[in-house]
Each structure stands twice: as structure tokens, then as C-alpha cells.
């Protein structure tokens, strides 16, 4: 859910004198942002459907919408979305916002959420797997199940005694060289596995682009723990309160356009009652 630009100006409020502070435009967030005239986004350079260096991800498009609405130029600090992403981008003051963060993630301060989605089962229409809606379905017994290791659905598979035939794909990778979700969908298309379980935005995007027709079913009937449904927000530094409020205002005022972008990428969207409203 997680870009190189030239030299950046790091502004530390601790080092500013009183007169320098009074000269800052607080409404523009200059005291908080790397550059008040530029929207600097922390992003993964190769992580579709979220982002890439060509600007083809839905987070790229939402960032362009945000920059336009704020009247700012848009720039990126690219870094692989693996260990050290937040430390080496946002917390290093190389950029000012991460476009997608789970709301309960405490590695950064999050804004109000701008979408809600869930893990999903991907199957082939017309097969026995196509009507499965939960991990307790006995028809999954003995089936070859693709799962990303360490993700919440893996717990559900264990509880239901389904680990025996699981094909595991790595969770943390350098996205410049590896794409486990794409590999999983390719394995499903070529009948190397019977069903794939993926994070909803990945499932919807990859199924939509697959040459083989695939069905995406959000996991909406699972137990509350571990959660399968998440609210996704933007991430900022804990000190950036004005900037957070500005982003919250953008989310509130542009929800329709944001939703249209997400739908165009096949993201399964849920309302606050857990009902599927778009796919």
C-alpha cells in the first residue's frame, strides 16, 4: 500500500527563531511540510494498482487530484514498500504524505479514511469455487489455496484446517523484482491453484486485467478477529496536525471523485455496514 527526486529542503521547527516562525504561512502548512508549494508523496515505484513511477496507480491519480485541488505541484519520493519505507521517506522528511495507510496502523498518524475494503477470494466462474463466500465452506477442503503468508486470512485457513494444501506466497518483497500477487493470479489462471485469497484492491485490479475471466468475492462473513475489513486513510507525521486537517477536508469534499477512481481499478468498496457498494 505503499519514489527519487532532487534535493529537498528539510525544515525543522525546532531550529527556527521566533521571527522566522511568525513569517511562516501556517494555513499553507509551511511549518509542517517539506515545501509548502509542492505536494510531495511517499510512494512505491513499482506497486500497481497503488503506484508506480509512470503514475499509473490509483494512489497516483488521487495524488494528482489532491495536488490540483490544493494548487500545488506534485513530486514523489520513491522507495520500495518494504521494511524501512516510513522511516526512509515520511519520517526522514523527504515527503509529506503516504496515500494509503490502514486506519489502525500506528506507524504514522492517519487521516479520516477515504475507502473501506476487504480481503477477497478469487475464483474461476462456473467452478465449484465460484460460489464460496467464507473460509469455513467445506468445499475448500482438499483444494489448492493460494495465500500471502502472514496475512489475516491465513489465520482463518488454519482455524478451518486448510493449511495442508496451501501454496504460500511471500508478504514482504522488493516490488522492483517480485510481485507475489500477480504470480498467484497467474497460477490460478493456469490451474496451478484452485482459488486465490488476496487483499481486495489487488484481487479486483488483477482479476480485471487477467486474460482469464475471474470472479472476486469479498470476505464479508468471517469472524471479527482477525479483521478482514479495513478502512484506508492517508498517513502523515504525528506532528503535522494542520496538514492532517487539510487532507481531511480534501477527502470530505472530493469523495465522489475519489470513489470513481477506486471503482475504475476494480477495488471492492464497502459501506460502514459492511455491505458491498461497488466492485
Image (tube, helix red, strand yellow):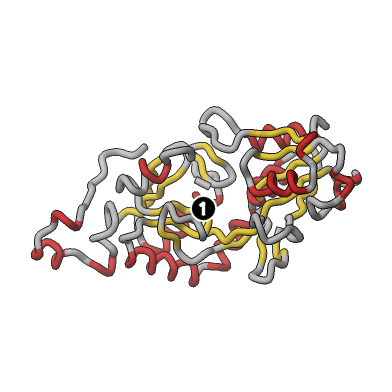
Q: Is residue 260 left or right of residue 145?
A: left
Total numbered circles = 1
Question: Do we see residue 246 in this rendering?
Answer: yes
Quadrant showing the C terminus:
bottom right
Residue at 33% x, 48% y is 91
Residue at 50% x, 44% y is 55
- In the image, residue 29 lies at what x, y percent? 28, 63
Q: Is residue 204 left or right of residue 247?
A: right
Vertical relation: 229 (above or below) 216? below
Residue at 51% x, 52% y is 61
- In the image, residue 58 lies at what x, y percent? 55, 51
Q: Which residue is mark 1?
A: 61
Of 230 and 4, nearer the camera is 230
Q: Residues within 10 Å of mark 1 (few under 14, many from 20)?
A: some
Of 106 and 42, nearer the camera is 106
Q: Is residue 274 left or right of residue 1?
A: right
Residue at 41% x, 47% y is 42
- In the image, residue 212 lies at what x, y percent? 80, 38
- In the image, residue 243 lies at what x, y percent? 35, 63
Vertical relation: 13 (above or below) 141? below
Amino acid at each position: 500500500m505503499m519514489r527519487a527526486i532532487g534535493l529537498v529542503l528539510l525544515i525543522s521547527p525546532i531550529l527556527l527563531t521566533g521571527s522566522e516562525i511568525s513569517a511562516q504561512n501556517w494555513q499553507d502548512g509551511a511549518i509542517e511540510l517539506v515545501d509548502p508549494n509542492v505536494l510531495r508523496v511517499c510512494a512505491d515505484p513499482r506497486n500497481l494498482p497503488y503506484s508506480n513511477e509512470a503514475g499509473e496507480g490509483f494512489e497516483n491519480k488521487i495524488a494528482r487530484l489532491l495536488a490540483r485541488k490544493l494548487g500545488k505541484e506534485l513530486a514523489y519520493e520513491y522507495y520500495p514498500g518494504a521494511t524501512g519505507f516510513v522511516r526512509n521517506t515520511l519520517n526522514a522528511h523527504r515527503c509529506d504524505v503516504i496515500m494509503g495507510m490502514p486506519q489502525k496502523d500506528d506507524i504514522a498518524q492517519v487521516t479520516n479514511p477515504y475507502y473501506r475494503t476487504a480481503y477477497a477470494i478469487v475464483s474461476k466462474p462456473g467452478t465449484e469455487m465460484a460460489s464460496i463466500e467464507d473460509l469455513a465452506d467445506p468445499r475448500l477442503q482438499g483444494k489448492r489455496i493460494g495465500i500471502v503468508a502472514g496475512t489475516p486470512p491465513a489465520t482463518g485457513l488454519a482455524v478451518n484446517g486448510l493449511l495442508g494444501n496451501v501454496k504460500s506466497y511471500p508478504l514482504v518483497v522488493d516490488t522492483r523484482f517480485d510481485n507475489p500477487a500477480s504470480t498467484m493470479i497467474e497460477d490460478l489462471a493456469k490451474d496451478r491453484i484452485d482459488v486465490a485469497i488476496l487483499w481486495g484492491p489487488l484481487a479486483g485490479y488483477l482479476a480485471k486485467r487477467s486474460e482469464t475471466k475471474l470472479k472476486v468475492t469479498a470476505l464479508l462473513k468471517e469472524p471479527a478477529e482477525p479483521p478482514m475489513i479495513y478502512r484506508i486513510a492517508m498517513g502523515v507525521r504525528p506532528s503535522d496536525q494542520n496538514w492532517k486537517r487539510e487532507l481531511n477536508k480534501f477527502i470530505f469534499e472530493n469523495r465522489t471523485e475519489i470513489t470513481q477512481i477506486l471503482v475504475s481499478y476494480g477495488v471492492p468498496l464497502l459501506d460502514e455496514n459492511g455491505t458491498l457498494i461497488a466492485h
